[in-house]
Image: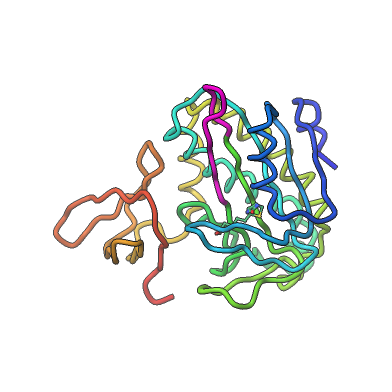
Amino acid sequence: HLGSKAAAAGYRLAAFDSVGSTNAEALSRARGGEAGPIWFVTTEQTAGRGRRQRAWVAPRGNLASSVLEVMRVPPGTAATLGFAAGLALETALQQVSLEARARSGTDFGFRLKWPNDVLAAGKKLAGILLEAENVGGRLAVVVGIGTNVIAAPTETPYPAVSLHDLGISVSAEDLFAALSDSWTELRGIWDDGRGFPEIRRRWLERAAGLGEPVSIRSGDGALEGVFDSIDDTGCLIVRTTDGRRVPVSAGDVYFKGV
Ligand code: BTN
């Protein structure tokens, strides 16, 4: 079920017992004229998609959710919406983990990792995949959020963790209700891109590795430097040893010594 703020703001819900990919489902509905905003949700994906053409493998019980927003903005502006999604998930995670935090006395160390992963204690807890397509002169933007609720995938190139591993027992349904509400709020602040400076400010407060040495790997090789900031298009700014500030639009970030 949707959160009450999301429902009041006019979001609709398409829930599936099992589906190939909620992102693919959202895009195909957009091509068919669906104008959104609408959430596509399941706890079983059979062909989940990840960033950079990777598969997103998740055991049944994890949360796969995609929101479709159709708007008139340039594609570059829509890319910054992924930061609102990371913040929305972090906000929802803080809410659903309140009780576990009080019981265990631990802060779970939720952090946002560029471009839009969510980490807990340095391990990947959630991934976000943004896809956009021009449909009849408007841009159909799909923001897909996959969260490890009951189990983390095992064969990943990075360490992964689930809410269950952390001792946070929340159902995918309750997490989704919190997420759809926090999304509604942050999507409102983002406001067709005009509110990105505020989203970026909040995002940077929760960023992993800001000011620290990083290595960025992409198809073109590796870039080494210090994670300096994020620019107003969402690019990661890396400060290299020769003092250049290089904008990076795509790639995987590795923190040194991790
Ligand atoms: C990544 O970290 O590579 C991004 C993973 C994104 C996974 C989510 S699950 C819901 C939505 N549907 C998909 O097929 N992918 C995204």
* Residue at horizontal 70 percent and vertical 29 percent from the top: 34
Residue sitting farthest toward the front: 32
Q: Residue 9 is drawn in which quadrant? A: top right
By secondary structure, the bulk of the magenta-drawn segment is best described as strand
Camera sees residue 197: no
In the image, the segment drawn in magenta is 129-140
Point out residue 20 in the picture as x, y percentages from the top left corner.
72, 55
Number of labels in the image equals 0
Q: Nearer the viewer, residue 5 or 28?
A: 28
* Residue at horizontal 69 percent and vertical 39 percent from the top: 182
Residue 174 falls inside the magenta stretch: no
Q: Residue 29 is drawn in which quadrant? A: top right
Residue 136 falls inside the magenta stretch: yes
Residue 228 is left or right of residue 53, and the answer is left
Residue 87 is left or right of residue 193, and the answer is right
The answer to whether residue 16 is above or below residue 195 is below
Tell me which image quadrant ligand 1 sits in: bottom right
Point out residue 104 in the picture as x, y percentages from the top left corner.
75, 69
Point out residue 147 in the picture as x, y percentages from the top left corner.
68, 58
Picture quarter with the C terminus: bottom left
